[in-house]
Amino acid sequence: MKKSLLALAVLGAFAGAASAQSSVTVYGIVDTGIGSVDINNGGERTTGLTSGAQSPSRIGFKGTEDLGGGLKANFQLEAGFNSDNGGSAASNQIFNRVATVGLSGAFGKVDLGRQTTILKDAHDQIDPFGGSGSIGNIARIFYNGGVATNGAAVGDRVSNTIKYQTNSYSGFKAGAAYTFGEQEGDNGAQRQYGVGLGYANGPLNVQFAYNNVNADTATGGVVTPVGEAKIAFIGATYNFGAFKLHGAYADGKFESNAGGTDVKYRNGLIGVSLPLGPGSLAASYAINDNRTFDDADSQQVAIQYSYDLSKRTNLYAGYARTNNDIGAALGGSQLGSLNVTNASVGGGQDVSIIAVGIRHKF
Amino acid sequence: MKKSLLALAVLGAFAGAASAQSSVTVYGIVDTGIGSVDINNGGERTTGLTSGAQSPSRIGFKGTEDLGGGLKANFQLEAGFNSDNGGSAASNQIFNRVATVGLSGAFGKVDLGRQTTILKDAHDQIDPFGGSGSIGNIARIFYNGGVATNGAAVGDRVSNTIKYQTNSYSGFKAGAAYTFGEQEGDNGAQRQYGVGLGYANGPLNVQFAYNNVNADTATGGVVTPVGEAKIAFIGATYNFGAFKLHGAYADGKFESNAGGTDVKYRNGLIGVSLPLGPGSLAASYAINDNRTFDDADSQQVAIQYSYDLSKRTNLYAGYARTNNDIGAALGGSQLGSLNVTNASVGGGQDVSIIAVGIRHKF
Amino acid sequence: MKKSLLALAVLGAFAGAASAQSSVTVYGIVDTGIGSVDINNGGERTTGLTSGAQSPSRIGFKGTEDLGGGLKANFQLEAGFNSDNGGSAASNQIFNRVATVGLSGAFGKVDLGRQTTILKDAHDQIDPFGGSGSIGNIARIFYNGGVATNGAAVGDRVSNTIKYQTNSYSGFKAGAAYTFGEQEGDNGAQRQYGVGLGYANGPLNVQFAYNNVNADTATGGVVTPVGEAKIAFIGATYNFGAFKLHGAYADGKFESNAGGTDVKYRNGLIGVSLPLGPGSLAASYAINDNRTFDDADSQQVAIQYSYDLSKRTNLYAGYARTNNDIGAALGGSQLGSLNVTNASVGGGQDVSIIAVGIRHKF
């Protein structure tokens, strides 16, 4: 009798804790390393502490509520920060990574707010580096470094977005997203949309995505024509057991609406990832091929070894190098992770970073 | 034996969790919808994602410590944010909604820091929309939209404030608050105070509040005279069972200290709220009557239906419209919830917003 | 049978909560009081709400993961804020107090990121006021108020820093830290380092620390010479039982690299702390002696009583006064805690603050 009373007391004592716990989870990643960057082969290396070499540092709050009948309400709020200096990742935008609320169930999942693009969802599954971190992420060189000429941003993350994703049917999964432009007087200006289709089953994972950005702006009903950025991406991984092969191709085009030249890009990636000793190795080679202008291509090689101390904590060592033709200047985000004062990559300059660090998930 | 050991082990394992849990609770609201705003009847509607149409999105941390003898220490830290884009609600002010610490007990409750005014506490109990959210909150049109002419802000929330509230005695409850101006050389400049008295018992709720703002400023001991804003508010709700009737009246006056004209306002609200089907309906009509200048009145109608998916999650649909005389320009915060770039309400322009969304509490 | 099943159900129900709880703890301090400051003896006092008079208000997230074999992974993220107005303590730097990740074990403890200097670690153990709070902290007057002439900041907290601390061996403990300058083209510019050694055993605590800042800057490889700030600190406390005696001495020197005058400082502190009635009393007298220029000394007296309501909550009353020679202007952070608009301390002006408040730890 006493025993069950005790157990009941336990139940009672934790009833509050349990319900509170179920409504919100605090989670995050702190990834800090020692990094050394070199711009243009020759100059002295700048060495310092780096944030997010393997995975961007972040802290978040999320929760799921069971509404019954398989329906769930979900929310997620995620803030990026620089773990080397405690700095905010974005000015006056606390939840710069994710701010969503939505429903999921038999119909799939719909989320409203700030979130990843369908395009990023696809390449994150294909990139040997998981599409994040400053060492080797695919998006730094793909799509001309994430920003098409003339200002049409092709960001990883977008605000004011409704995203719908299906559940998985025999490995097939599709998604679509629409980003409101919210320019007064022209609902098309600054709008963005994306669609995706994937197949992940057994050793094979194939991902297709298309992203379209209208770069026009509108103020007080007056539209300033800029252009349209269109990107198509296809990638696949195949797990041979001993290693996984990664390959991706993307085709990008910026169509000027303002009488300028249309610019075309072509991107390719080949990579490999494998378990190795007590950890894992990832490597990739990627190219941004400017098809409109000569001498404006960029290439990137990246390699990283991750040594697991636990499921939540690992050490890593990585190296990445971006080579730019005279008309290209990609790779700056490698510097940004180190927050080097006043440093930037100029046309034709090459950038390399070597980093060793620790990544802790909580 | 083994059973009780097991139970003891459970007790032990969670002792730390339980005490930690009791000291801080993470809570919040994510309210995101699709909204469409129209300025001045004629122009194209701007449609996008909106934050806080029903309730401002927020995340907070709070806790209560039992000090014994009925005395409690309380703290609350609450940050507003825009759930459509992850943006901070205020620049360089993380806990822009609430930042308080204080004591409560038999003597009542005293809180120090940033918090709601006594005035807001009163109208939040009377407003069918609960005094928050961009659809129909009372404060957007009352008190000339929260800001008296000549710059005397009559904000919902104030910093540097001591607030005292009594406990409830047979339904009666009173409160008083003082906001320090913190201007060097004149402790009266920028000070604010409020007093309130309420009676909530059975179907009846009556709330009275008075708020007084000194709008003068002081720098290095030199005072710049501006004026004083005085507001008296009385409101009541009566629950007839099938529906609840809401009514409020406010009288505002801005007295110039700088030789300008004194300006008087008069506000009225009539509203209704009722359970309807699986949710609830709220509607209100409010007026800002400028008694000093002609053709400077504003009117607002608002209606909202809330459909409960659970106690914590609901869908909603709402509509609000503000009509301005040529000398008035209220209703801008309806636009703000959508974060439309470069949009503002001009004199005589009318504003309407329609929104459907989801609100999730955690 | 039923009883053990119940206990098992308890175990099961809380398994998730327990593991989540163990990975992150939310903690903080809210310290808000009523303060009154007076600049230069004569003017009217400015009275208002003050944040952090006893301890700076903060909120943090931390956790420890047991990696096995005595090895642990640790992280800590801590944000300062002003509890009187909800304001952020630093612009665009959310975790302005601490942002670290690291490992600890038999080898000691290593942390990467933003954290306290070795110098601050030492004086926080010696200062009767714990080295924090606006009433009486040692660093406001030591080291010429934390900033050597010509801009070589000697901050309490530094970014981009690796800190190593040994475990305690018979009371002996040592530490070393290196702060990367991260200036492009000169890895020495803006670098900082510190070493420390302490002995804490029984009634005696002795702390020694040395801090060295290179104040040069570099942009695009071009170095601007500024100077070097060197500080040596030694302090001790001895607990006589009825009271604890505190004493500290520091020697500071700013060596110009730009042809300017070298400036030398000498600091001394004598203090006492003791349990008194239901709380505790702390008092200190400190001096900043400018050895290079005449009439540029400052003195500070501070006294504070803390009345405990519980282990986590206390009330306090404190007084501090800084007297400046005509060539000195220290003590401004006393004003800052009150956030008085446009107030600052000029040369030769004296500053005093009196504050009563409540501090709640969660």
Image: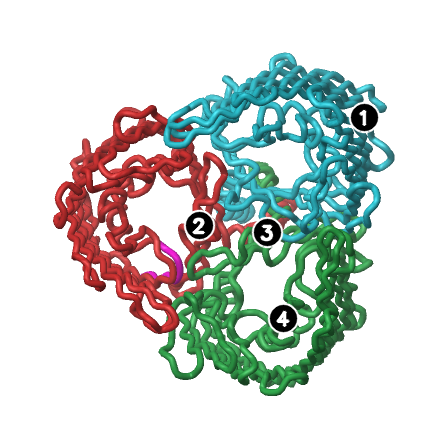
Chain colours: A green, B cyan, C red
- Spatial CA distance of label 4 from label 3 is 29 Å
- Spatial CA distance of label 1 from label 2 is 46 Å
Q: Specify whether disc 1 shares its chain with disc 2.
A: no
Q: Specify whether disc 3 shares its chain with disc 2.
A: no
Identify the mark at residue A147; answer none if there is no mark. Answer: 4
Q: Which amino acid does label 2 sit on?
A: Glu
Q: Which chain carries label 4?
A: A
Q: Which amino acid does label 4 sit on?
A: Val
Q: Is residue C309 in view?
A: no
Q: Which amino acid does label 3 sit on?
A: Phe
- Spatial CA distance of label 3 from label 1 is 36 Å
Q: Neighbour class for label 2 at 10 Å: few (<14), some, many (≥20)?
A: many
Q: Specify whether disc 4 shares its chain with disc 1.
A: no
Q: x and y percent of residue C55 in the render?
A: 36, 39
Identify the mark at residue C78; answer none if there is no mark. Answer: 2
- Spatial CA distance of label 4 from label 1 is 51 Å
Specify which label sits upstream in the sequence, 4 or 3: 3
Q: x and y percent of residue A333 in the render?
A: 52, 70
Query: Is residue C79 rendered to the left or right of residue A242?
Result: left
Q: Which chain carries label 1?
A: B
Q: What residue type is labelled 1?
A: Val
- State if disc 2 and disc 1 touch (CB < 8 Å): no
Q: x and y percent of residue A356 in the render?
A: 42, 73
